[in-house]
Amino acid sequence: MRMMWEVLVVMLLAIFGKASGGAGGGSSGQMRPCPRGCNDGAGAMDDGVMSYCLSWRVGVETNNVRGWRTVPLQCMSCVENYMVGGQYEREVDMVMEQISTYLSGIVLSDDGMDAWIFDIDDTCLSNLIYYSNKKRFGCDPYDPISFKKWALKGESPAVPAVLKLFRKLVWSGFKVFLLTGRDEATLSQATLDNLHNQGYFGYERLIMRGEAYKGQSAVVFKSEIRKEIEGEGYKIWGNVGDQWSDLLGDSSGDRTFKIPNPMYFVP
Amino acid sequence: MRMMWEVLVVMLLAIFGKASGGAGGGSSGQMRPCPRGCNDGAGAMDDGVMSYCLSWRVGVETNNVRGWRTVPLQCMSCVENYMVGGQYEREVDMVMEQISTYLSGIVLSDDGMDAWIFDIDDTCLSNLIYYSNKKRFGCDPYDPISFKKWALKGESPAVPAVLKLFRKLVWSGFKVFLLTGRDEATLSQATLDNLHNQGYFGYERLIMRGEAYKGQSAVVFKSEIRKEIEGEGYKIWGNVGDQWSDLLGDSSGDRTFKIPNPMYFVP
């Protein structure tokens, strides 16, 4: 009887040891959840889907995937995990590290004509709240009326790392231009207020899309504005945006830096 | 006695059930290994390192991270997993899907002057064998003597998806130009042979870096060649390469397509 109990206790200890070790690998014997990212191991997602969605996201970021209206539906969780799970911030930090390295090699001139350009939406200001609540992280198509309603609230928070860069540039003596495709006629005040309430002040100029530029693609509009800025004598050292249409075209700047954005595409 | 045995049997069954279910989530009760990619759950890698390495890789692909000599050492496993674990192929497939969509909208002219450009190294031909055996997937810096020794063997296999695209373009009537920074004087025959033994024939022209272009950056060299090609009357519809220096500059083509390559950077 006593021996049976001892055998029982030893067996139970051995089996509980196995059960808490878990099934499968890892040097600690514990299976870690997969790290944050487009193929975040949220548990139930198929490997093939996650691999596809990471490829899609990288394709968007490299400008291989263009002209898309919506995020593929099977990638919604992937994009959500990416945007809210920490990988987005990590990738924005990587951009900022590169900018820092670039800045350390720049000697500003005495003429006050050293310029830097920022896009606004999802570069300076984040629309993640809107895209998560109203647009299923980009799985629903752009709706100008709905977006305007959101923008008029002026509640887009700053992208923290970009605000930090902005302040560093202004403090260093760069003339910072904020260049946006937002409609000047309807969103001027709301945009100004939003920028200011998030800490964006001290920029040289806020340039919005006026009547003359309506209907043009962002590349054409922004190229023309940048050419005008250069025409005034400014040297555009850097240009930061979340869309390739912020960064391509003429007078794009000595260096361009793409902020990640898997939620929408602006042609 | 009998009751004790019954209790023991029931407990053992319950505990073995838990043990084979494993520790933690998943709808099947099984913890899947993390999917292939830069943050592949190889088991022992730190989440922070994997997240950093995915950011680094995306930074390289977006041309935010430039001028780097080697892959960060902590990212070696990440790059290895990416290149050999399937995610690289998935991302190349994504590029090919985008090219297919683009091609379906092209109507070739009757004049036989519709052109397409490919880079060679790690676009048409893969140097993964060399980079894995000799260069720790890019953690060791470029060594022209060692690379030349490899290239002279002419053993680089085709990148299968790119070969398939190449054949489709030639069959469709495009004039395909293979444009490489490889040195014409020393690698001409080996490159020709390697291309042919991998199935690359029927191209219009193979253009290598001749004496006149020595010392120039790849962007300058390739821009000049593409301008000459356009000067002959060709229309460059597409341009495919694994380096941003294949795709930037003048006459870059109506569409450019970046093949992933986290192993090295060509300025």
Image (cartoon, coloured by chain):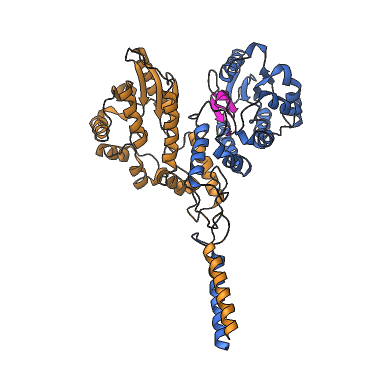
Chain colours: A blue, B orange
The quarter in which the C terminus of chain B is drawn is top left
At horizontal 44% and vertical 39% (from top left) the residue drawn is B90
Looking at the image, residue A92 sits to the left or right of residue B238; the answer is: right
Looking at the image, residue B20 sits to the left or right of residue B146; the answer is: right
Q: Where residue B131 sits: x, y (%)?
A: 36, 43
Asked if residue B99 is among those painted magenta in the image, a careful observer would answer no
The quarter in which the N terminus of chain B is drawn is bottom right
Q: Quadrant of residue A216?
A: top right
Instruction: Using the image, determine if residue A250 lies above or below residue B138.
Output: above
Looking at the image, residue A73 sits to the left or right of residue B224; the answer is: right
Compare residues B45 and A13 and report the one nearer the observer.
A13
Q: Where residue A143 sits: x, y (%)?
A: 65, 25
**What secondary structure is the stretch in magenta mostly built from?**
loop
**Residue B121 visible at all:** yes
Instruction: Using the image, determine if residue A134 lies above or below residue B238.
Output: below
At horizontal 54% and vertical 41% (from top left) the residue drawn is B55
At horizontal 34% and vertical 15% (from top left) the residue drawn is B113
Asked if residue A253 is among those painted magenta in the image, a careful observer would answer yes
Q: Where residue B190 sits: x, y (%)?
A: 24, 33
Instruction: Using the image, determine if residue B45 lies above or below residue B57.
Output: below
**Residue B260 visible at all:** no
In the picture as drawn, the residue positioned furthest to the bottom comes out as A1
- Count every numbered label the image shows and give the total: 0
Compare residues A195 and A72 and report the one nearer the observer.
A72
Instruction: Using the image, determine if residue A254 lies above or below residue B31.
Output: above
Q: Report the span colored magenta.
A: A238-267
